[in-house]
Image (cartoon, grey):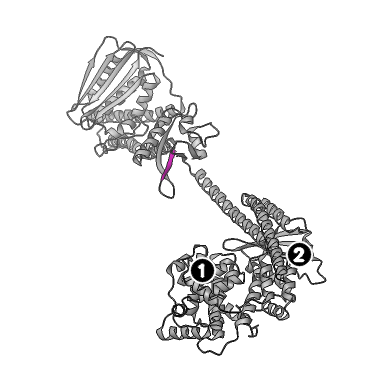
Amino acid sequence: MENEKLKERLSSIKSLPTLPVVASNVIQLTQNPDSTAPEIADAISQDQSLSSKVLMTANSAYYGFPGKINTINYAIVVLGLNNIKNIVLSTSIMERFSESDDDFLFDRKQFWQHSLLCGIISKKISEHMGIKNFEEMFMCGLLHDFGKVVLDTYFHEEFVQALEMAKTQEIPIKDAEYKIFGFNHSGVGALLLKRWSLPPSMVKSVEFHHKPDEKKSVKRTASIVHVADYLCRRIGIGSGGDDVTPTLNKKAWNLLELNAEIIKKMTIPIIQEFKSATGFLGNEKDSE
Amino acid sequence: MKKERLKENHQFLAKTISGLTDHIDLFETVQDLSRKIISQFDRKKIFQTFSQIVKEVVAYKYAAIFLFDKTDKSFFEAYNTGIPKNRLIKHLPEEKVITWVMYQGRWTVITDFEDKKATKIYSILPIVGREQSLGFMYIVTDNDESFYNRKFTSILGFVASQTAIALENLRLYDKIKSSQAYLQNMVESISNGIMAIDMEGKVTLINRNTTAILGIKTRQIIGRHYMDFLKGGLKKEVNKIHKEIQSKGYAVESMVSYRPYKEVQITVGITASLLTDQNKETIGTIVVFRNMSASTEIKRLTRLDKMKSEFVSNASHELRTPLSIIKSYTEALLTQVEHEDIETREHFLSVIDSETDHLTGIVSNFLDVSRIESGTYGLDYSQFSLKELVNSVIVRFKAKLTNIDIFTDFKGDTHVLDADEDKIREVLINLIANSVKFSPTGGIVSITVLERDKSVICSISDTGIGIPKDQLPFIFDKFFRVDNSDTYEIEGTGLGLSIVKHIVESHGGSMVAESILGKGSVFTFSLPKKRR
């Protein structure tokens, strides 16, 4: 029911947001296990501005490589394919969705800050849990609320209504969205990421980040994003567009084997990494 | 246009699928190979296998493995595939680069392909364990920019993680081995015999002392049933204790006399306790063997030492009494007794004479003991009648005593013996004197002589104070004196009975003492009629 409504509404959009061709090619290439570094470097080099963004981010304090990375090729072999994919994807999305209507209810800058912090916390938790592919977990965290931007862009008036409702009734935005649209941002984001052929685990983690125990296959990753989202709001950097801290899913929390002590230890590295990662946020200058 | 796009998509998909299939195939191969890594418990072999597998993925020219030294945070080369050492060290990246790569934890190429000067490509494959970085493989390949892809990255990551597991396993294995050696040392250094057996009775652990104490010659004991190699009474006793402890949970220490080697007789103390695992489940029995002979010997020596010091004080006292009597009577004779008072002088002289006899008796006892000890205590055989000898001895006692009655009872006719008459006289004097000494006024000493086919048996019984049961076994020991407040004031060297027993036994006879405390004692000796 929810899904049908969602599909119906989205199909009403004439031009669904697409990824830039270059980014899309790069992501496809990185998903093929046989793609070589030069092939991917070629693909990135098709877009001059993307190339320079990639190099800038690769040299940023966030990655902290103790040396100069001058070529895309070198960036690929030093940072690895997952990081390159992350840089390309986040740069492209943020460029595409960063312009804001100066809407005080939904501040894009605040939104991306929240997303970035969530990505970093997701990554840190994954590292703590010994999950190998923590770079992908960064992406899951970064894009978990992506649906909100889509709603804000394509159904602006209704989304503003939802924001106001969340504010006045003091309810989470996802509940307000549901009242107004009949679906909420997690489904929208997931649907779009799926269209962009991003890995299914990433798509599902975004889709289930509010109800992490409902989908077995992504229970772990969705739980990470869920807890990271919760911790972001506790830390108080950035904004997801509402002020109500979502309730913490106990099962998800228990699954991650975290405790107050571990969180306390993680907090400072998280804030440091967040500061060094602002290069991800498009037009801002690298802090190095 | 659309058709072309479809074709393009199709091509891409086909390529991706074939890539994925290759990926799976390669992964399966690598998985098989990496199983080889994990099953190794030898560092060099782990590194060899690791290098071989890596070579199948990236055809390197050289590779070397560096390990971190936990103590000073440096790293050292632990293995290489034949690269000249200096050349490799020269090309090692700065430490901060290595640290960075270790932190990232994935295979990282550190040479820029596009650097025109680069003829070789250097890359680092971190070996990261569960909780710490263990080291890395430094890989040198020809400048082939196409070797870096996702497939190789993930395979190398997997192989490196397997190597890390193998190294950690190896460390645990070494730790177990060294703690096992530590325990083994402890078990071996315990002076008792220790043997652990499982629920089926098979030996799981045994120390060298067990085989030494028990004189077990069987070589391979571990894994064998204890009933297979234990012998005689020991086997029975261990079996009993094992059953007891398994059914009741405890067992009382038991002792068994055992002959581990020919002509060696020892007393073995056996104790046992239950052997449990970490869940408190019983998994067997620990049996401890103690050679009690050693501790019995120490007890005996301690007692002997105590007796010797008692002897010194007793003997001085014994010698001193007759000496001071002789001294005072002699002084009186010289200074106080009138020259004409012949009666007094004779009385005094007879006292001196009898005390001199007493002294001679004591000294001859000492001499006897020293002869017995040096083995020069010979016997001078002759034929005589024991009845006559007894009668001649008691005449002397009767002459001195008024307050104790001595009765005799002779059964049989001849009582003729072939023996050393002087020595047997000594036996009788000693035994009768003892009986008299320890009998209160009004007591009775009776002497019975029986005749058998080949021997004559003589018992001397008294109505004296008796001997405590626990001290009875020791009364024939040298220097032994019954320790009792009643005997405290009675003189004696503690040598008489040991001499008596020695005399009887050197004749081929035997000697027994029976006693009831407070009622009296009976000393019986038997002597063969004919010389052996």
- Going by the image, does B475 lie left or right of A98? left
- Going by the image, does A269 lie left or right of B17? left
Mark identifier at residue B265: none
SS at badge 1 = helix
Read off the residue under disc 2: B146
Reply yes or no: does residue B287 show up in magenta: yes
Q: Amino acid at mark 2?
A: Ser
Name above or below for residue A142 compared with residue B499.
below
Q: Picture coordinates of residue B110 (x, y %)?
A: 73, 69
Residue, x 27% and y 15% (percent of image)? B450
Q: What kind of secondary structure does the magenta stretch mostly adopt?
A: strand
Q: Identify the magenta region.
A: B281-289
Q: Chain of mark 1?
A: A
- Tag 1 near tag 2, CB within 8 Å: no
Read off the residue under disc 1: A222
SS at badge 2 = helix
Residue A49 visible here: yes
Q: Residues within 10 Å of mark 1 (few under 14, many from 20)?
A: many
- Residue A86, by quadrant, is bottom right
